[in-house]
Image (cartoon, grey):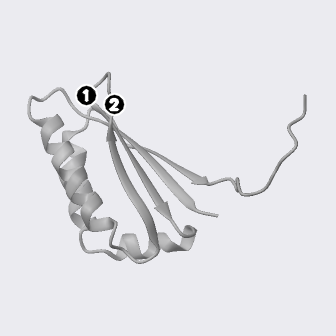
Amino acid sequence: MVYTLTVHLYASDRPDSIERIKAKLIEAARVYRKDKETVDWLVMQDVHDPRAFTVVERFENEGSQKYHLENPYWKTFDPYVVPLLDKGMDLRRHEELDTSKDVVVAP
């Protein structure tokens, strides 16, 4: 099944942080979607709190992150984004559930 990372970022209250993070995330998505074994790389902004962002990184398997981490662009991402954040990134790792088969849900 697909290996997924979700990363939550929260922009600092500096006036330009939101726009700078937004631009960097869009740029990153356009770069990372081209990586081998990347299923998708999605970036989102909270509809109620413009300082809150979520990145959903989907890979064919856990080992596929190798290509992402070897991308030279990776070295530019954290140094640019981290100073613009109010708190550290919240990264979570997931295995997507197989929804292709019927299941029995207990009452």
In this picture, residue 89 sits left or right of residue 98 = left
Q: Dot 2 lies on which element? A: loop
Q: CA distance from mark 2 to mark 1?
A: 6 Å
Q: Which residue is mark 2?
A: 46
Category of crowding for the residue at label 1, using alpha-carbon neighbours closer than 10 angstroms: few (below 14), some (14–19), many (at least 20): few
Look at the numbered disc 1 and give the secondary structure of its residue. Answer: loop
Q: Residue drawn at (30%, 24%), measured in percent from left and top? A: 49
Q: Which residue type carries mark 2?
A: Asp
Q: Quadrant of the N terminus?
A: bottom right
Residue that mark 1 sits on: 50
Q: Nearer the viewer, residue 46 or 10?
A: 46
Q: Quadrant of residue 21?
A: top left
Relative side of 104 to 54, left or right: right
Residue 106: x and y, percent? 90, 34
Q: Nearer the viewer, residue 51 or 47?
A: 47
Quadrant of res 41: bottom left
Residue 45: % across, % down: 30, 36
Residue at left offset 25%, top offset 62%: 30
